[in-house]
């Protein structure tokens, strides 16, 4: 099977695995550039998309690719500027893409790093995020002057990334001459290191200090990175003092981010700081209906209500539950009614209410007779490394945490270390009875 044909098969599975918005905005823009010795090189059109796809969809893409090739593969993500967003969208979407569709009209300069389908139209507003949404709308009307900087914080999967993309897209559509830049804090740090190595620091500074609106996702990633903080401090000052807009997101309040200089924290808090809470019942119900509509999946009203009542944690888990229900129904060729959903998710509510990342770490450490501090420490003892890898595997597979979030929890490790641990467990799981037993025993203690 040639690469193009293989990737088309992978894309067909991905298309039904995520929402149409996510597929069009992210996964449809990727390409399989190479596959040698079970290492797949996947191209993305820009570094922003590369980081998003790698951090959020590594496991999903690997699972689909492994199934298509009947091999265990590792993924490497790279930038291929030949992949234009419009070209890739037309090529991969097939009948979903129409010449005059809203998707094409919404496209902005790919160099901005913005996902066009993450906009205010697709952003569900409720009591958990209405203040953040209202503030974002005010910023769009007068960027750089109202609520600058704008700092949004909240847990995993509550819509922070969607909101700041929506801000960027709305500003871009209303200000054709604006240069807007979306970037993750990890990308900022990586590009800084690359600029220092290649002696192109002036080019790096010009890129970030000459934009009209800078959107930085997961700013907590710069914690403990002194040179990144130094450079971001000066970048922030250059933009703020010249009246240009800065928008930041984090998984916690500014003052609760560890190992970040006080002068940066004070600047983060100098504008408007808002939080986004997990969605309430009404908001969850609206979201699950929208996600089903995006996937052309019809459900009875009582099933929608059951899902909204059962899954209370975050939007990603809600969307994941819908996907699992779709796949189960399609594989069984069964109509989805309330009894079907209740049987499928019978114990799900108990798990989502009780299990947290801290509990996963605690139970895993206890199972191996370690302390949680040791599990997240730097020791390389073989039995401790195995326990650490299993904890990482459970955090990813069962709680669906982002790679960077897991890295933060496991002693500040980078996402490549986290991916290595996940791959290691996946490779050994089928052949290592002892490993499976340990994982199953920990899952039982967690009621997974």
Image: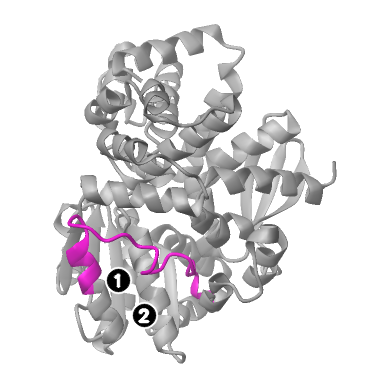
Instruction: Tell me the SS state at disc 2.
Output: strand
Q: Which mark is residue 247?
A: 1
State the residue in front, 279 or 231: 279
What is the CA distance from the residue labelled 1 to the residue labelled 2?
A: 8 Å
The earlier-in-sequence mark between 1 and 2 is: 2
Q: Is residue 278 visible?
A: no
Where residue 411 appears, as percent x and y from the top left, is 32, 37
Where residue 132 appears, as percent x and y from the top left, is 21, 65
Displayed quadrant of residue 152: bottom left
Displayed quadrant of residue 343: top left
Main SS, magenta residues: loop
Residue at the (49%, 55%) spot, across then down = 52
Say whether residue 222 is left or right of residue 66: left
Vertical comparison of 118 with 437: above or below: below
Where residue 169 appears, as percent x and y from the top left, is 42, 75
Q: Which residues are magenta?
A: 111-135
Residue at the (54%, 33%) spot, across then down = 327
Where residue 358 appears, as percent x and y from the top left, is 25, 30
């Amino acid at each position: 099977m040639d690469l193009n044909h293989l990737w088309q098969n992978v894309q067909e599975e991905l298309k039904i695995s995520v929402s149409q918005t996510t597929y069009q905005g992210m996964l449809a823009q990727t390409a399989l550039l190479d596959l040698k010795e079970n290492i797949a090189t996947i191209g993305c059109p820009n570094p922003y998309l590369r980081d998003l796809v790698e951090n959020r969809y590594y496991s999903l893409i690997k699972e689909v690719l492994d199934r298509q090739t009947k091999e265990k593969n590792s993924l490497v993500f790279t930038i291929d500027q030949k992949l234009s967003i419009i070209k890739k969208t037309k090529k991969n979407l097939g009948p979903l893409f129409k010449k005059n569709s809203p998707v094409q009209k919404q496209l902005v300069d790919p160099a901005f790093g913005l996902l066009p389908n993450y906009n205010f139209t697709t952003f569900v507003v409720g009591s958990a995020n209405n203040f953040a949404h209202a503030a974002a709308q005010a910023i769009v009307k007068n960027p750089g002057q109202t609520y600058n900087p704008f700092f949004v914080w909240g847990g995993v999967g509550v819509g922070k990334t969607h909101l700041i993309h929506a801000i960027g897209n709305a500003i871009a559509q209303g200000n054709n001459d604006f240069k807007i830049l979306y970037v993750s804090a990890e990308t900022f740090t990586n590009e800084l290191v690359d600029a220092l190595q290649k002696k192109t620091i002036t080019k790096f500074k010009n890129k970030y200090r000459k934009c009209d609106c800078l959107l930085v996702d997961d700013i907590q990633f710069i914690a403990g990175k002194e040179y990144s903080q130094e450079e971001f401090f000066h970048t922030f000052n250059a933009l703020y003092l010249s009246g240009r807009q800065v928008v930041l997101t984090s998984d916690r309040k500014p003052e609760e981010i560890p190992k970040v200089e006080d002068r940066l924290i004070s600047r983060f808090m100098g504008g408007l700081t808002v939080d986004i809470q997990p969605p309430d019942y009404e908001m969850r119900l609206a979201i699950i209906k929208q996600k089903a509509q995006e996937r052309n999946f019809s459900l009875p009203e009582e099933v929608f209500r059951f899902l909204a009542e059962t899954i209370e944690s975050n939007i990603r888990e809600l969307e994941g539950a819908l996907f699992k229900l779709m796949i189960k129904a399609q594989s069984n060729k069964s109509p989805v009614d309330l009894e079907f959903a209740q049987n499928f998710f019978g114990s799900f509510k108990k798990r989502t209410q009780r299990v947290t990342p801290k509990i996963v770490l605690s139970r895993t450490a206890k199972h191996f007779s370690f302390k949680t501090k040791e599990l997240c420490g730097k020791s390389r003892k073989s039995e401790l490394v195995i326990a650490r890898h299993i904890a990482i595997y459970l955090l990813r597979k069962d709680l669906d945490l982002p790679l960077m979030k897991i890295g933060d929890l496991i002693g500040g490790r980078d996402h490549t270390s986290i991916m290595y641990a996940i791959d290691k467990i996946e490779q050994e799981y089928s052949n290592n009875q002892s490993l499976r037993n340990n994982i199953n025993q920990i899952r039982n203690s967690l009621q997974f």
